[in-house]
Each structure stands twice: as C-alpha cells, then as structure tokens.
C-alpha cells in the first residue's frame, strides 16, 4: 500500500533493523512492484555549463567557487542530438539535459532548450530536463515540447538545507515541483547523501520525498562527489553500508518509484553497487560523465551487469504502458 504519512520514528525503525532483514524487506517490496534483475539506464548531458549564481556547497558549477569547470552556453542542436543517439545506441531509454541556471528565463536560451527537447523526443527517448526553478507556464511549454520528466532535487532535509544552500529556499524547490506536477510532467526528485548531515536529516529527506502525493516517479539517490574548490571537498566519504541502508529504506517507502543509483558510483566498488541493486535500486545514470563529474563508463557498467546476471530495460515508458515496459529487456 502506498503511504504519504511516514513519521521519522517509523522510518528510523525501518532503516535501523538488522541489515539482512532490511535487505530482505526491500527486495520483497521491489519484486512486488518491478521485475527482478532489470535496470533502467538514463544518460545525463550538461547542455549549459558553469556560472550558476546559486551557492550549493556541493556543486562545481557554482559561480561562487573556483573549481576549474569551463563555462559554455547552450550546446548546438546537432551536437546534442548526436549525443542522444549515441546514448540510445548504448541502451539508455531516458536522455536528461541539464542547464546550470538558478531559474529558467524566457528568451532565446529557453527556446533553444525547447528545440532540444523536441529533437530528442523525436528519437523515441524519454526526455528529462533539469534547468532550475520554473513557472507554471514554462513547465507547460516543456510538456508541450515533449518533456517527459523534470528533475528538481530537494538535496537534504529542511533542517539541514540552510547549511548547504542559502540562495534558494526549500519552498522554492517545492514550488517548482508543484508546477511540474500541474503541467503533467513526471517528477524526478531525490537528494545527496554524505554532505555531513545527521541520520535524522537523511531520513528527513526520505520523509519529504515520500510525503509527495504521488511519489516522485524517479528518486535519484546521490553519494556526494567531493570536488576540489567546493566547501564540501574535504567531507568524509559516506560509509557504503549506510548508503545501501538509505537505498533500501527509499525502496520500502516508495515502492513504485524508480530508485536511481546516481552520482558517486565512480567511487563505489562493484560489491557496493550490487548491494544497492539488491536493496531495490533499479536505475542508473550511464556514460562517462554526470554533468561535469566522472562516472563509470559503458564498459564497466556492462561488465558489472553481466557479471551479476542482470539486464537493462530496452524500451522507454513513453513508448509502452508502464506495466509492459517492465517486461521489455535487453540481453
């Protein structure tokens, strides 16, 4: 049964149970709602990089920090379409385009992104965008262009949020999510683990995500990638088993959502990633880069999935009904 009224005490009881019990519960919930051993792939491309006026403490694209990221404007259509075709050939069913903006502003840059959405959708891929805050009207324009999903993460709990970002409020993020829902676009919304938050903050993030009705269709769980020049560069790495516990708890709380193993995979062992899949993660970001940061490449991902005897989803949810999509898998 789907729930939207979890208490912190209930979430902590799930998260803190003996590890075998937690994994068994998460895998049981997963198999009730998704086929076993099947992973969906998304590819993320930064179509406008650097110079963001926000001060998110984890982000190498913030104009507040010197991280060596090279800035560029919106990429040419031919280049983006070529990358989308490449991602599709490699097995991705969703192509995500990110722009380092605080908010979407009407004009030629947004018009250019709308053209990119139309071009990529024409390939038969699910199109996801992450462009910062947007209005109801802008969300509608994205929907009309063919945008299937919009990513706008909450990052962390409301209580810890102010220690990570001061240029945008938590309510700003929630307002954008409401605009996305109102336009009929599916929601991709998650957060980052390992920024120095407490356990209560980590579970508070999950409570915020699971209190959304409906739950986000996609829940990306990121492990902090420490970037030189950002305030979190020296943060202690997250304990792998704590990260797996977070994945498992998210799966139990949001049983019908895709739980996406996102940033930080490049620093994870095969064993950690395998545990995440067992715990209910059923989606990854593929490709050499996530926006500006390194990511396991096609060869490593394919080798891991083959070694585990698992398979990739072959057809996007846009092309087939939800229940059928889960049955179409690549060898």
Image: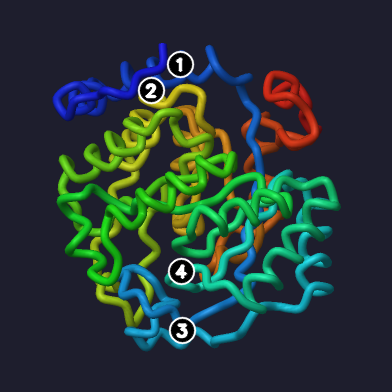
Secondary structure beneath dot 4 equals: loop
Where does the N terminus fall, quadrant-wise? top left
The residue at which mark 2 appears reads as 252
Secondary structure beneath dot 2 equals: helix
Secondary structure beneath dot 3 equals: loop
Residue 286 appears anywhere in the view:
no
The residue at which mark 3 appears reads as 51
* 261 with respect to 2 (left or right): right
Residue 103 circle label: 4
Secondary structure beneath dot 1 equals: helix
- Report which quarter residue 49 is drawn in: bottom right
> Of residues 327 and 185, which is closer to you in this image?
185
The residue at which mark 1 appears reads as 29
State which mark lies toward you, 4 or 3.
4
> Of residues 236 and 318, which is closer to you in this image?
318
Q: CA distance from mark 4 to mark 3?
A: 13 Å
- Report which quarter residue 200 is drawn in: top left
Q: What residue is rendered at 33% in x and 57% in y?
A: 172
Q: CA distance from mark 3 to mark 2?
A: 38 Å
């Amino acid at each position: 049964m789907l729930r939207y009224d979890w208490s912190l005490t209930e979430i902590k009881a799930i998260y803190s149970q003996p590890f075998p019990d937690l994994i068994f519960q998460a895998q049981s919930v997963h198999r009730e709602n998704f086929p076993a051993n099947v992973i969906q792939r998304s590819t993320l491309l930064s179509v406008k990089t650097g110079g963001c006026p926000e001060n998110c403490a984890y982000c190498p694209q913030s104009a507040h920090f010197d991280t060596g990221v090279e800035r560029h404007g919106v990429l040419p259509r031919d280049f983006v379409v070529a990358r989308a075709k490449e991602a599709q050939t490699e097995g991705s069913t969703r192509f995500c385009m990110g722009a380092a903006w605080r908010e979407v502003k009407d004009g030629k840059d947004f018009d250019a992104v709308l053209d990119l959405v139309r071009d990529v959708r024409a390939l038969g891929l699910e199109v996801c965008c992450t462009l910062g805050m947007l209005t109801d009207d802008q969300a509608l324009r994205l929907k009309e262009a063919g945008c299937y999903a919009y990513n706008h993460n909450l990052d962390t709990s409301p209580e810890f949020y102010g220690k990570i970002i001061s240029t945008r409020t938590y309510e700003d993020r929630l307002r954008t999510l409401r605009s996305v829902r109102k336009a009929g676009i599916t929601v991709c919304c998650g957060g980052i683990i390992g920024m120095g938050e407490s356990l209560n903050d980590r579970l508070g993030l999950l409570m915020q995500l699971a209190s959304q009705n409906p739950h986000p269709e996609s829940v990306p769980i990121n492990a902090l990638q420490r970037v030189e020049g950002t305030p979190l560069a020296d943060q202690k790495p997250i304990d792998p088993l704590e990260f797996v516990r977070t994945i498992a708890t998210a799966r139990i709380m949001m049983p019908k959502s895709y739980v996406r193993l996102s940033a930080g995979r490049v620093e994870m062992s095969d064993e950690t990633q395998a545990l995440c899949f067992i715990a209910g993660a059923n989606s990854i970001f593929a490709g050499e880069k996530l926006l500006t940061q390194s990511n396991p490449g096609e060869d490593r991902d394919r080798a891991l999935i083959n070694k585990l005897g698992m398979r990739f989803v072959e057809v996007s949810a846009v092309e087939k009904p939800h229940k059928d999509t889960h049955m179409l898998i690549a060898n």
